[in-house]
Every structure is written in C-alpha cells, then in structure tokens.
Amino acid sequence: MGAFAETVRDSIRDSLAKRLPRFEWETEYRIQRTPVDVVGHTDDRFVAVELEWRRADPVNNTAKLFYYVNEGELAEYDRISVVQVFTDYYALASGGVSSKREVAEFVGTVTANSFEQVSFSPVTFGLTPPKRGGEWPDEWEGVAEETVEEIVRRI
C-alpha cells in the first residue's frame, strides 16, 4: 500500500473504533498468510474490511477470506461480516461499474449465501485514489467518513 492508502485505511479503522467501540479494531490482521486491511472483532463477532484501490483482481482477497471461513479458521465467531470497499477506480465513465467489481461482488454474494453466519457487503469509496506519489484529493477525509457510515449501516 502507498502512503495515501495507508492513511485512509488507518482513518477508517479509527472512525470505526469510535462508532463501534465494543469491537477491537486492527489493521493488517492476518488470517493464515492473508492480511486483511481492517478487522474488528468481539468475542462473537468478526468484521473484515477489504479496501480495493486499484487491484487487478479484487475478487482474490475476499475469496480467500471465504475459503478460510470454509476451512474453519473463524469458527469461534457466531457472526462474520465481510465488507469490500471499492474506489471509483472501478467505476465506468459511461456509468455502472467494471466487470472486475461485478465479478467480485457476485463471488462475495454467492459465497456469503453459502454460510449461515456470514454476510457480504460491497461499499463504494467515492473517489479515485491517486497513483503512487500523486496528489491526494482534498475531499478524501469526508469520503472516508461517508464510507465508514455505510460500513456501520451494513454491519
């Protein structure tokens, strides 16, 4: 991750911690070999937030999370929420979203429906992130707060 992505990730973690203080919030939480961008957990709940900035295969990390659920890695939790946050990098100029996002959402939805205790929610982070070293958009903090509000509604 670049500096912008790390700053936004940490901002999202901190905002989630303020809104949902019963959860312990961490970044780069590892499930086996897979780091999850932001995780919140209690004794019985687990929330995984994957941030998709410019990834060529956004379905990959979320598919791995569901694989680990299937393998029993998160069996101690009664409820598991997976939130996949997509930047506007995945938006099409003509409207709608890219097939990469569509496929990731399809896989996330179908897979979550296979587990009684799991939910999946796609969320939009309403701006296109700068390329590494590029200028940060002025409105990023407001967009991050809107994204957190949507994540809280979904979990």
Image: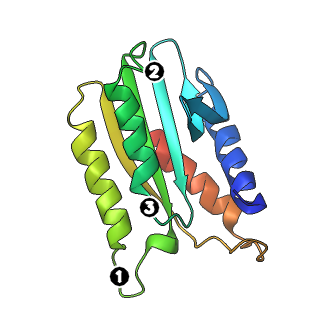
According to the image, label 1 marks what residue?
95
Mark 3 or mark 2: which is in front?
3
According to the image, label 3 marks what residue?
57
Outermost residue toward the front in this view: 33
Query: Which of the labelled discs sits on residue 45, or is there none?
Result: 2
Query: Looking at the image, is mark 2 or mark 1 earlier in the sequence?
Result: 2
Tell me, yes or no, if residue 155 can be seen here: no
Note whether 78 is above or below 135 in the view shown. above
Q: Secondary structure at mark 1?
A: loop
Check contact, mark 2 vs mark 1: CB within 8 A: no
The quadrant where residue 144 appears: bottom right
On screen, residue 131 versus residue 59, left or right, reads: right
Image x and y of residue 83, in percent: 44, 44
As rendered, which of 94 and 21 lies closer to the eye?
Answer: 94
Give the CA distance from mark 1 to mark 3: 20 Å
Tell me, yes or no, if residue 90 can be seen here: yes
Note whether 122 is above or below 78 in the view shown. below
